[in-house]
Every structure is written in structure tokens, then in C-alpha cells.
Image: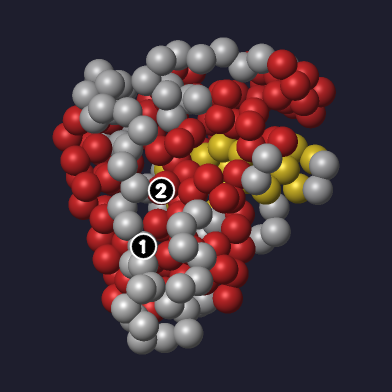
Amino acid sequence: RNDIMAFELPPLPYEKTAFGDLISEETFNYHHGKHHNAYVSKTNDAIKGTDHEGKKLSEIIEVADGGLFNNAAQVWNHSFYWLCLSPEKKEISGELKDRLEKTFGSIDDFKSKFKDEATGHFASGWAWLVLDGDELKITSYHDADTPVAHGVKPLFTLDVWEHAYYLDYQNARPDYVSALLDNAVDWDFVALNMDGDGVSRADQG
């Protein structure tokens, strides 16, 4: 069959210069243009001629292991991460604000706990806000691991692999986490994920 579409590198939902010093154009060139793109290529290479061809990214993640899992999950995680970011500062409001305050005490407490999770996560990985059943939870997964593999609903993520921040923040992961969490999150997208299927927004196939 020649009609099976390969996975593609999704375009960024904003200009690479839109974040100024928060996330540099150079970081987007490497992070999106090189790292994310490589995961897409490796996933396509790994599924060629296998039963995985024609499946959704999320379907592959749910059953794969080893290199295929790592690359497919990284494609999904990155696609979701770009959607979580906004070059315009947004406020947390509405139901999301109410739920975060109810669960974590206050928005400041939520941000503080999220920063602790993201900065305290050892080595490479991702910090997440997820909906586990009806409960909001802050967690992190190592390397390429993803909520898609764990049956929880992803609402928001920050990439804490060094390639996400090293060009702009060097080894100061806490500065990167604080800068993005306070100034560059699309909280409207996060709120939409509470009601809808966050997985489908980053899925392909």
C-alpha cells in the first residue's frame, strides 16, 4: 500500500522568534527542527513495513517498547509541548483555576509544586499536570515516557530534557521552568484538555 501516510513534523503554532529571550529562535531551530524532527524520522523508519504502519501515534505508543516506544512517544510529547506554550502571557481562569485552587490550595502553590517536580526530576524527562480519573495530579516521567502509556489524561507539560533549555539557560533548569510557567503557558489550551481529549490534539495517523 502506497497510501499510508508517514508521520510528519507538525509546524509550530507561532513564529520561532515570538518568545524573545524566554525561548530563543536558536532553541526552536534545534529543539523543533533537529530533535523533534529526528524522532519523527526514526519513528517512520521503525514502522516501515510493519503492522504499525497506518496506526495512530497513540496506538503505537500503547503497545510499543524499546526504540520504537522512545521515538514515537517523543514525537507525541513534543507535539503536545508546543501546543502548551504561548508567546502571549495568559492567565489561569474559570474552571481550571477553581480546580487547581481546590487541589493545590492556590495558583501560587500549584506553580510552586509544579516547579519542584520539574526541577527535582533527575536527568531527562517531562513534568506533567494530568487528570487521573477525576483527580488533578502533578507528576513527571523519565526520558520519553508519557501519560499516553499510563491511562491518564495529559493537560500540560514542560520538557525538562537539557536540549529544551540549555542554549538559553545553560544548566539553570529552575530559571527555565519559572520563566515558562510564569510567562509562556497557553492556559486556554490546558483548560480545553480538561473537557476534551488532549491526546487527540497531538496525535497523528
Q: Which mark is residue 173?
A: none
Quadrant of residue 44 in the image?
A: bottom left
Quadrant of residue 108 in the image?
A: top right
Which marked residue is nearer to the observer: mark 2 or mark 1?
Answer: 1
What amino acid is at disc 1? Phe
Q: Pick the quarter of the image with the N terminus.
A: bottom left
Q: Crowding near pointer 1: few (<14 within 10 Å), some, many (20+)?
A: many
- Residue in view at x 45 percent, y 41 percent: 81
Q: Position of residue 12 (x, y in %)?
A: 32, 37
Q: Position of residue 205 (x, y in %)?
A: 46, 63
- Residue in view at x 52 percent, y 76 percent: 64
Residue at label 2?
78
Label 2 and label 1: CA atoms lie apart by 13 Å
Can residue 105 be seen from the camera position used here?
Answer: no
Mark 2 or mark 1, earlier in chain? 1
- Residue in view at x 64 percent, y 37 percent: 193
Q: Position of residue 65 (x, y in %)?
A: 50, 77
Q: Nearer the viewer, residue 49 or 156?
A: 49
Q: Is residue 202 above or below residue 204?
A: above
- Whether residue 26 sits left or right of residue 59 in the image: it is left
Q: Is residue 17 above or below residue 9?
A: above
- Whether residue 132 sits left or right of residue 168 in the image: it is right
Residue at label 1?
7
Q: Nearer the viewer, residue 74 or 55?
A: 55
Helix, strand or loop under label 2:
helix
Q: Crowding near pointer 2: few (<14 within 10 Å), some, many (20+)?
A: many
Quadrant of residue 19 in the image?
A: top left
Q: Position of residue 101 (x, y in %)?
A: 76, 20
Q: Nearer the viewer, residue 179 or 30?
A: 30
What amino acid is at disc 2? His
Report the number of discs: 2
